[in-house]
Image (cartoon, rainbow, N blue to C red):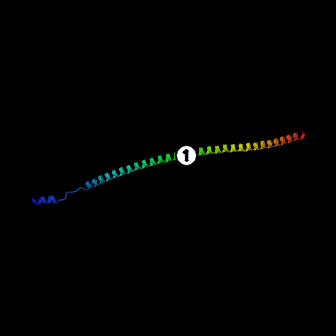
Amino acid sequence: MRYLCHLAVMEKPVINPLNQIELQAERMSKDLVELLHAIDSRLQDYAHYTSESIEIQKDATQTLCDQINTAVKNGSKLIQSMDEIMLSIDSLYSLGNEIKLFSAVLSQLEVAYEQKKNALKLSK
C-alpha cells in the first residue's frame, strides 16, 4: 500500500493540451485588451494635445492678424497725417510768398512816400 501511495504522489497529472492552448489564448486576449486600452488612452492624449495645439495656433494666428490690421490702420492714419502736414507746408510756402510780395509792395510804397515827401519839401 505504501507503494501505491508513493506511485500516486509520483505520477504527473495528465494535462490536456487544449486546456493549455485555451489558457494561453486567454492570457493573450487579456494582454491584447490591455494593449488596446493603452493605445486608446495614448490616442486620446494625442488627440487632446493636437486639439489644444490647434486652438493655440488659431488664437496666435488671430492675434497676429489683429495686430497686422491695427498696424495697417495706423500706417494709413500716419500717411493721411503726413499728407495733411504736406498740405499745411504748401500753404505756408504760399503764405510766405504772399508776405514777400506784400513786403515788396510796402517797400515800394515807402520809397514812393519818401520821394513824394522830399518833393513836397523841395517845392516849399
Residue beneath the point at 57% across and 44% down: 70
Position of 120 with respect to 60 (left or right) is right
Furthest residue in direction right, as rendered: 123
Mark 1 closeness class: few <14, some 14–19, many ≥20 residues within 10 Å: few
Secondary structure under tag 1 reads helix
Position of 70 with respect to 22 (left or right) is right
Q: Vertically, is 95 above or below 19?
A: above
Residue beneath the point at 47% across and 47% down: 56
The quarter of the image holding the C terminus is top right
Position of 37 with respect to 123 (left or right) is left
Residue beneath the point at 87% across and 40% down: 121
Position of 108 with respect to 95 (left or right) is right
Residue beneath the point at 10% across and 59% down: 2
Q: Give the camera-side residue of 95 and 53.
A: 95
Pointer 1 residue: 67
Furthest residue in direction left, as rendered: 1
Q: Give the camera-side residue of 26 and 78.
A: 78
Residue 115, given in percent of the width and then of the height, sits at 85, 42
The mark total stands at 1
Q: Give the camera-side residue of 92 and 43.
A: 92
Residue 58, given in percent of the width and then of the height, sits at 50, 46
Three-letter code for the amino acid on which mark 1 is drawn: Gln
Residue 62, given in percent of the width and then of the height, sits at 52, 45
Residue 88 falls in image quadrant:
top right
